[in-house]
Image (spheres, rainbow, N blue to C red):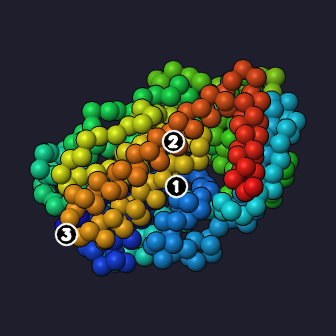
């Protein structure tokens, strides 16, 4: 039996690709149900990773039906509200709501394949999983798809995530076009960065006329456990453009702290019989390469394909998967770490503008 810990995008992709290839698996997740918590904002799915995985899963047409039109548009502003770069997008990396994508994957699996309320308390040598309710389960193949604070990772590696020095505060603006058209115009049709003074706003349009905003600040790790208020956040942006400040002042609902953690760039482990990791459990990184969910889905698809091609030689299948995953994730993690620094330099947004200029040069060179 293949046991997958974690029903995030990576774990569900692995389960789906195994299922379409006739291989049994079970997925355990700590949450009580698929809707137990907010799943996060929008994702842009890359052709070589997220979209590759959906092709392997036979779900690419279902994905295209739930993408946000023009969601891949992007603009970069400075602290005065001046637009320094604007791009309408080209449709190569369509945007999708994370919740809808997860539902697409979940609905493609047989009933009972995902077992909710199965919180893992410990993982012991020999691939023995201990659940919080006292149950134990020993499995032939154990895959940790259990995110940043993975329990399965301890079987393979002593590495733990480190605080990246940056925290987000997630806020939301509802009925944007209908009630706050000025804020909708500032954000634009897709993704917006407004950066300066080593801080900023990262906002994205969502379905149902909503805007998700991440207020980004360099803070001590423990800051995210303090009481957050809009007034306190606004104090961090004195002197900024008033429309940008209004992203805080006119937001709705609770303030959600999201400190940014990352595993060491190039994290890897020695092959361990019958066990491996995918997604954030394997290569947690900051979001500044747009790669986390995409890599998790590609991990899941490639691992499933490797197992399906070698069902009688699981060790070789796991080794083949890891040999491709390690360098791929290292490159993305290095890029993410560099982009984080570029976004929050004292002269921001110049570092981000320079990074996109380099991407354009590389893209042009690849096409020539």
- List the residue tagged with mark 2: 331
Position of residue 121 in the picture relative to residue 146 (left or right): left
Q: Position of residue 57 (x, y in %)?
A: 45, 72
User: Badge 3 local density, few (<14 within 10 Å), some, or many (20+)?
Assistant: few
CA gap, disc 3 and disc 1: 29 Å
Q: Position of residue 56 (x, y in %)?
A: 46, 71
Residue 231 visible at all: no
Badge nearest the viewer, 2 or 1: 2
**Among numbered discs 3 and 2, the one appearing first in the sequence:** 3
Helix, strand or loop at mark 1: helix
- List the residue tagged with mark 1: 294
User: Quick check: 49 above or below 266?
Assistant: below
CA gap, disc 2 and disc 1: 14 Å
CA gap, disc 3 and disc 2: 31 Å
- List the residue tagged with mark 3: 312
User: Badge 1 local density, few (<14 within 10 Å), some, or many (20+)?
Assistant: many
Q: Residue at x 50, y 69 (%)?
A: 54
Badge nearest the viewer, 3 or 1: 3
Q: Which mark is residue 282?
A: none
User: Quick check: 338 above or below 356?
Assistant: above
């Amino acid at each position: 039996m293949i046991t997958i810990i974690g029903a995030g995008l990576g774990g569900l992709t692995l389960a789906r690709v195994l299922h379409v290839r006739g291989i049994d698996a079970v997925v355990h997740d700590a949450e009580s149900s698929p809707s137990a918590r907010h799943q996060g904002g929008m994702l842009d799915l890359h052709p070589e990773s997220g979209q590759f995985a959906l092709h392997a899963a036979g779900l690419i047409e279902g994905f295209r039906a739930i993408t946000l039109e023009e969601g891949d548009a992007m603009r970069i502003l400075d602290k005065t509200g001046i637009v320094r770069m604007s791009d309408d997008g080209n449709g190569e990396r369509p945007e999708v709501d994370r919740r809808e994508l997860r539902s697409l994957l979940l609905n493609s699996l047989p009933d009972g394949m995902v077992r909710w309320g199965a919180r893992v308390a410990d993982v012991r040598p020999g691939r023995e999983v201990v659940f919080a309710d006292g149950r134990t389960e020993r499995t032939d193949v154990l895959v940790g798809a259990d995110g940043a604070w993975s329990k399965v990772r301890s079987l393979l590696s002593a590495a733990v995530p480190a605080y990246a020095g940056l925290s987000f505060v997630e806020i939301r603006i509802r009925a944007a076009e209908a009630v706050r058209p000025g804020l909708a115009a500032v954000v634009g049709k897709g993704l917006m960065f407004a950066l300066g003074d080593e801080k900023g706003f990262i906002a994205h349009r969502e379905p149902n006329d909503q805007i998700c905003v991440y207020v980004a600040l360099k803070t001590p790790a423990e800051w995210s456990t303090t009481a957050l208020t809009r007034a306190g956040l606004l104090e961090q942006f004195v002197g900024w453009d008033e429309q940008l400040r209004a992203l805080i002042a006119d937001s709705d609902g609770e303030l959600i702290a999201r400190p940014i953690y990352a595993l060491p760039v190039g994290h890897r482990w020695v092959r361990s019989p019958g066990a491996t990791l995918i997604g954030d459990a394997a290569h947690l990184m900051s979001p500044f390469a747009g790669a986390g969910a995409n890599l998790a889905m590609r991990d899941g698809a490639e691992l499933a394909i490797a197992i399906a091609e070698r069902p009688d030689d699981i060790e070789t299948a796991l080794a083949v998967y890891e040999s491709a995953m390690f360098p791929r994730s290292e490159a993305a993690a290095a890029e993410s770490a560099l982009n984080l620094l570029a976004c929050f330099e004292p002269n921001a947004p110049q570092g981000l503008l320079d990074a996109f200029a380099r991407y354009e040069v590389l893209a042009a060179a690849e096409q020539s």
